[in-house]
C-alpha cells in the first residue's frame, strides 16, 4: 500500500550511503512510496544490491553507483550518470558516513579532525554542488542526515558533532541561497539508534551496558530509536507534504534534546 506522501513521477532520489543502515532504510521507504532511487555505495556492493532488489520488488527502478564523496570528480560523474539514467533528480539525500569513535576533543589529533571535516563537510559539498542544476530544474529537495549531538552535545562526540555542525551550516546557506530556485534544504538529526549507533558503540568498546543505561535515562522516551524512524523523517522532508519547509533540522532523538 502506497503512502500518502508523494514524489515526482519522473526523476529519482539520489541517496548516498545507500548500503548502510540509515541510507538503506531511506532507500526502502522511498521505493515503497513510489520514488525511483539512485543508490551510492563505497565498500559494500552486495548490501547496496540487496537494497536495489527490494526497490525492484516495489516496481521501482534503482541504479547502483560506486562513490567516494571525498572526490569532487567522482561526485560530478555519479550525479550526471544518475540524472541521465533516471531522467533527472528530484531529491538528494546525503546519508553517507563511517562510524566515528567517541573520544575527548583534547585527545583528537588535528589531522584526524581535518580528515573528518573533509569526509563530512567537504564530502557533502562535493555531492551537492554538481546536483544543484538538476535540482533547480525540478524545484527539488536536499536532506542531510547529521546528528542530534549538534543540539545537545554528548561528551566525547566532538569528532562527529563538529563536522556535522559544519554540514548543518552549509544546509542553512544552501536553503537561503537556493530557495529562489524552489530548492528546499533540510537536515535530520538522528539520536541513539538500537540498530545502528548503539550497536556499533558497544561492539567497538566505546560504550558498555552501564553507559547505555545512562544514555537511555537522558532520553525523554527512555528508549533508542531505529533507522526506520530516521527514514520516516527524511522521506517526509523530501516529499511534497513538506513543500513549504526549508532550513529546518528535525531531530529524531526521542526527546534527547529537551
Image: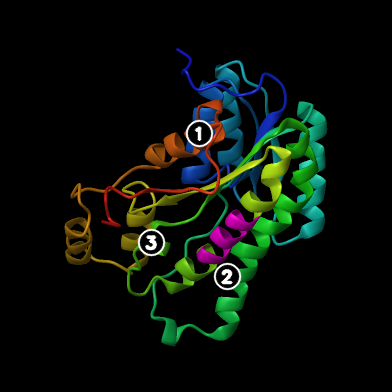
Q: Is residue 197 above or below residue 25?
A: below
Tag nearer the camera, 3 or 2: 3
Magenta span covers which residues?
165-173
Q: Residue 243 is drawn in which quadrant?
A: top right
Residue under numbered circle 1: 235
Q: Position of residue 200 (x, y in %)?
A: 38, 58
* Image side of residue 197 versus residue 83, left or right: left
- Examine the residues drawn in magenta and state their main secondary structure: helix
Do the residues bearing badges 3 and 2 touch, measured as CB atoms within 8 Å? no
Q: Position of residue 141 (x, y in %)?
A: 63, 38
Indicate left or right for 59 with 75 as reference: left
Q: Is residue 204 above or below residue 18?
A: below
Quadrant containing the N terminus in the rendered view = top left
Q: Residue at label 3?
A: 151
Q: CA distance from mark 1 to mark 3?
A: 21 Å
- Can the viewer see residue 8? yes
Q: Position of residue 173 (x, y in %)?
A: 63, 57
Q: Residue at label 2?
A: 116
Residue at left offset 43%, top offset 52%: 189
- Give the mark, 3 or 2, whose residue is nearer the N terminus: 2
Q: Secondary structure at mark 1?
A: helix
Please, is residue 27 above or below residue 200 in the view?
A: above
Q: Secondary structure at mark 3?
A: loop
Distance from label 2 to label 1 (Cα)?
A: 26 Å
Viewer can see residue 54 = no
Amino acid at each position: 500500500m502506497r503512502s500518502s506522501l508523494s514524489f515526482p513521477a519522473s526523476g529519482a532520489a539520489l541517496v548516498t550511503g545507500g548500503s548502510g543502515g540509515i541510507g538503506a532504510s531511506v532507500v526502502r521507504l522511498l521505493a515503497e512510496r513510489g520514488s525511483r532511487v539512485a543508490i551510492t555505495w563505497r565498500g559494500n556492493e552486495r548490501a547496496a544490491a540487496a537494497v536495489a532488489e527490494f526497490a525492484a520488488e516495489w516496481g521501482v527502478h534503482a541504479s547502483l553507483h560506486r562513490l567516494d564523496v571525498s572526490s569532487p570528480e567522482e561526485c560530478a560523474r555519479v550525479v550526471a550518470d544518475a540524472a541521465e539514467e533516471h531522467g533527472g533528480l528530484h531529491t538528494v539525500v546525503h546519508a553517507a558516513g563511517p562510524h566515528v569513535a567517541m573520544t575527548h576533543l583534547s585527545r583528537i589529533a588535528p589531522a584526524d579532525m581535518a580528515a573528518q571535516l573533509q569526509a563530512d563537510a567537504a564530502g557533502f559539498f562535493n555531492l551537492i554542488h554538481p546536483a544543484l542544476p538538476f535540482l533547480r530544474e525540478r524545484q527539488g529537495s536536499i536532506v542531510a542526515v547529521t546528528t542530534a549531538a549538534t543540539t545537545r552535545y554528548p561528551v566525547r562526540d566532538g569528532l562527529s558533532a563538529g563536522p556535522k555542525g559544519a554540514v548543518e551550516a552549509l544546509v542553512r546557506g544552501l536553503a537561503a541561497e537556493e530557495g529562489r530556485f524552489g530548492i528546499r534544504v533540510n537536515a535530520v538529526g538522528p539520536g541513539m539508534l538500537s540498530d545502528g549507533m548503539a550497536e556499533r558503540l558497544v561492539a567497538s568498546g566505546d560504550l558498555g551496558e552501564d553507559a547505555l543505561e545512562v544514555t537511555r535515562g537522558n532520553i525523554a522516551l527512555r528508549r533508542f530509536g531505529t533507522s526506520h524512524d530516521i527514514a520516516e523523517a527524511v522521506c517526509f522532508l523530501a516529499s511534497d507534504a513538506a513543500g513549504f519547509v526549508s532550513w529546518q533540522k528535525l531531530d529524531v532523538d526521542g526527546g534527547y534534546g529537551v
